[in-house]
Each structure stands twice: as structure tokens, then as C-alpha cells.
Image (cartoon, grey):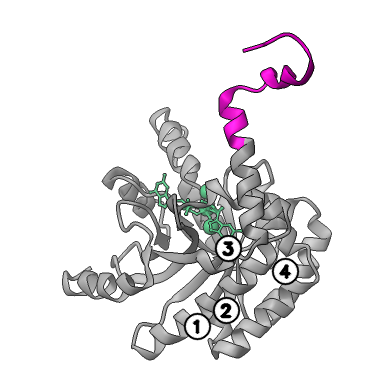
Amino acid sequence: AAKGAGRDRVHVFSPGLREAARWRLEVANRLRDGAVDEFVVHYQPVVRVDTGEIEGVEALLRWQHPERGLLTPDAFLSVAEETGQLIPITRWLLGETTRQAAAWAEQGLPLRMSVNISARHFSAETLVHDVRVALHDSGLAPESLVLELTETSVAEDPTRAEDQLAVLQSSGVTVAIDDFGTGWSSLAQLLALPIGTLKIDRSLLTAAARLAAHGTGPVLAAIVSLARTLGIRSVAEGVETPAHLQMVRDAGCDLAQGYLLAQPMPASDVLRWASRVRAAGG
Ligand code: C2E
Ligand code: CA
Ligand code: CA
Ligand code: CA
């Protein structure tokens, strides 16, 4: 509450905002002091819609905070991005995930490994180098690595994005457009870029269901088939219910990801999860 003037003028901040500001400062300090050691990676299976078999995984960053427990990216990602720490963290993550994928391949489970790349890293000179180093050190085949870029990070500067994407593609990795449907970029423009995969955001699943209910027709199927015509695979994200899965199947989507299928999990659980699904017959 306001206590007159002077130094108490912080009253314009709600306690929630003050708490948030304190948290951001704490995160920034810990990142600077080497909290990189406390990061872990969880992996969420991406499955084939037709068989239910695992095709790949998406690497999702977690922070094993000594006092606060396991934190998801909403608690720290924007701070890491602002302080410039996200690029070094991602460099570490690329090393970790390519090693993991190479190990799984050796154990008889070749999986595509998807890694999220921030807009800032995408526009940085170092990305291509960082990717090459990770592939070289791990021995992972470039075809097994997928870099996920959001629609907005490629839409910002399409001409530059196209060049950068072409360079990445020439190194053999696949680029996926993430969160498709959350921005306002044109599908035609996105699909003209050198990309291999389109990840359809959960919000588009719900919107498609609504539109279908109004007789607007198979929106999702149109997107998926346009992508396929151009040799681009589609992944439906955020599949939470059997109805979602049915819709995704009807639309002809190749791959799906979501809580209905599997939660993100530590690396040690992935082999077991994959073999359980196989044993169950998909
Ligand atoms: P994203 O790339 O869209 O990743 C999918 C997010 O949706 C993950 O949240 C995942 O746990 C969650 N999810 C999966 N299935 C479902 C579902 O069925 N329903 C719902 N509601 N959510 C589902 P998470 O791990 O909290 O990550 C949030 C976002 O943080 C990611 O969204 C991505 O944008 C970012 N992120 C995560 N890891 C990294 C990273 O290593 N680098 C960068 N730059 N960003 C990352
Ligand atoms: Ca992603
Ligand atoms: Ca996404
Ligand atoms: Ca998302």
C-alpha cells in the first residue's frame, strides 16, 4: 500500500510483480555464477500417428534448482535470453542431446533429436558452428538432428532467415517451424522456406475443432496436405485427448506429440517407454 511519497513509491508494483522482479534478479545472479551445472534435459517422445511408435524426442530444458526443485522454462528462459546466457546453455544442450541420441542409436533405438533454438541464437553467427561441433563430437548423423525455430524468429527477417536456413540445411540437419499457428505469418511463405517439418501448435488443434463444428471444413487436413505436397512433414503438438488424436489422424498428420501419448521424461526412462509401446503393439 502507498505510504506517502519518497522511497515508498514502489507501491505501484503489486506484491506479485515485486516477487517476480526479485525472482528474475535471483535467476540472473545464479546464471552468472555458473548454474549451468544445474540444468538437465527431459525428452518428450514424438510418435508416428499410424503405429504409435516412437520416432524421435524433443529435448526440453529443465533447471534442477537446489531449493525450488525442478523448474520448467517459463521460470527462467526469458531471463536467460535477456542476460545472454541462453546461447551458452544451448551450446551445452546441443552437446548433451547429440551425445544422448548417438548413445540411443548404439543401443538400437535410433531417434530424431529435436532441439529448440531461440531467435537470438538463430540470428547469431555461431549457430552453424555450434551445430557442427556438436555433430562432430558426438558422431551423430546430421539427419538425426532437428532444430526447432519458432514462426516468429524466421518471420522477423525472411530474407536473412532463408539464407541461414539454407546453410543449416546444407549441413544435413532438419529445420522445423515450431508453434505454427500462433503467429500471423503466411503459411505459403513459411512453406517456401527450406524447412523439413511443420509443428502445428495446440491452439490450432482447438481452433480446427471449432471450425469443423461450424462446417468450415477440414482446415487441419488442408495445412497438412499442402505441407506434404512440398515434402514437409507435419507434427501435431499438444495432443491431450483421444478426440485430438482422431482429428490429427483424420487430417493425415505424420507425427504427434502430447500428454496423451507421453509426458517429457528423463533420458533414463526413454528406452523403457519406447520398448513398452513396442511390446504393446503400438
Ligand atoms: P515448445 O517448444 O512448444 O515445447 C512444448 C511444450 O509443451 C513443453 O513445455 C511441453 O512440456 C509442453 N507439452 C507437451 N505436450 C503437451 C500437451 O499435451 N499439452 C500441453 N498443454 N502442453 C504440452 P515446456 O517444457 O514447459 O517448454 C515450454 C517452452 O519453452 C517450449 O515450448 C519452448 O518454446 C521453450 N523451451 C523449452 N526448452 C527449450 C530450450 O532448450 N531452448 C529454448 N530456446 N527454448 C526451450
Ligand atoms: Ca519446440
Ligand atoms: Ca511448440
Ligand atoms: Ca508452444
Dividing the image into 4 quarters, which one contains the N terminus?
top right
Q: Earlier in the sequence, mark 3 or mark 1?
A: 3
* Neighbourhood count class around disc 3 (C-alpha, 10 Å): few under 14, some 14–19, many 20 upward: some
Query: Regarding mark 3 in the picture, which secondary structure is present there?
Result: helix
* Label pair 4/2, CB-CB below 8 angstroms: no
Residue at 54% in and 69% down: 37
**Residue wearing tag 4:** 165
**Residue wearing tag 3:** 35
Which marked residue is nearer to the observer: mark 3 or mark 1?
3
* Residue sitting nearer the eye, 190 or 174: 174
Which marked residue is nearer to the observer: mark 2 or mark 3?
3
Amino acid beneath label 4: Leu
* Label pair 2/3, CB-CB below 8 angstroms: no
The tag on residue 95 is: 2
* Label pair 4/1, CB-CB below 8 angstroms: no
Which marked residue is nearer to the observer: mark 3 or mark 4?
3
**Can residue 195 be seen here?**
no
Q: Residue 107 colored magenta?
A: no
Label 3 to label 1: alpha-carbon separation:
21 Å
* Neighbourhood count class around disc 4 (C-alpha, 10 Å): few under 14, some 14–19, many 20 upward: many
Label 2 to label 3: alpha-carbon separation:
17 Å
| Magenta stretch, main secondary structure class | helix
Label 4 to label 1: alpha-carbon separation:
23 Å
Which marked residue is nearer to the observer: mark 4 or mark 2?
2
Residue 126 in the image: above or below residue 133 = above
Amino acid beneath label 2: Gly
Label 4 to label 2: alpha-carbon separation:
21 Å
Query: Regarding mark 1 in the picture, which secondary structure is present there?
Result: helix
Q: Earlier in the sequence, mark 3 or mark 4?
A: 3
Amino acid beneath label 3: Ala
Dividing the image into 4 quarters, which one contains the C terminus?
bottom left
